Image: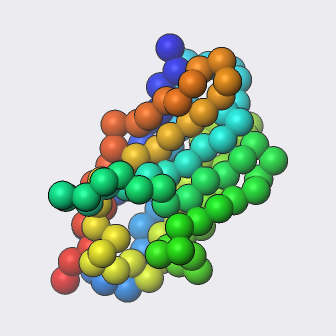
């Protein structure tokens, strides 16, 4: 069974940085796409960033220039480097992986809180 295990959330002051990590387990196959989503209290889950197997990336306008998504295909992991964090980045961040044979797989979520 394919599982995603996230780590790296926490509390940070505005302007600070955090790095989220997501590891794929239970398979030797690599996802064709990996992504990070987030959900703030009272809001819908939104797409933050995606990365394809060949490395092509996309970002939400709200995080462009501040967040960087990357992946290590050999280790089946995806990272989200978050810089210049703002209070509005506070949310539960979810890792997502997709492969045709799996469908969508989700991590359990990790809390990111940006506050002074």
Which quarter of the figure has residue 27? top right
Placement of 91 over or under 99, stated as above or below? below
Q: Position of residue 61 (x, y in %)?
A: 53, 74
- Residue at the location (47% across, 44% down)? 95
Placement of 35 over or under 57, stated as above or below? above
- Residue at the location (60% across, 33% down)? 98
Q: Position of residue 25 (x, y in %)?
A: 54, 25
* Identity of the residue furthest to the front in this view: 44
* Identity of the residue furthest to the right in this view: 54
- The answer to whether residue 56 shows anywhere in this view is yes
Q: Viewed as shown, does residue 80 lie left or right of 8?
A: right
Placement of 10 over or under 77, stated as above or below? below
Q: Position of residue 110 (x, y in %)?
A: 32, 49
- Residue at the location (59% across, 65% down)? 59
- The answer to whether residue 21 shows anywhere in this view is no
User: Which quadrant holds the C terminus?
Assistant: bottom left
Q: Viewed as shown, does residue 73 lie left or right of 82?
A: right
């Amino acid at each position: 069974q394919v599982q995603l295990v996230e780590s790296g959330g926490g509390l940070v002051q505005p302007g600070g940085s955090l790095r989220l990590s997501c590891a794929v387990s239970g398979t030797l196959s690599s996802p064709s796409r990996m992504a990070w989503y987030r959900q703030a209290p009272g809001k819908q889950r939104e797409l933050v960033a995606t990365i394809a197997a060949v490395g092509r990336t996309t970002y939400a306008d709200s995080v462009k220039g501040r967040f960087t998504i990357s992946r290590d295909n050999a280790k089946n992991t995806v990272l989200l480097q978050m810089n210049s964090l703002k209070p509005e980045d506070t949310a539960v961040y979810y890792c997502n992986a997709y492969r045709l044979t799996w469908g969508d797989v989700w991590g359990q979520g990790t809390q990111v809180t940006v506050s002074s």
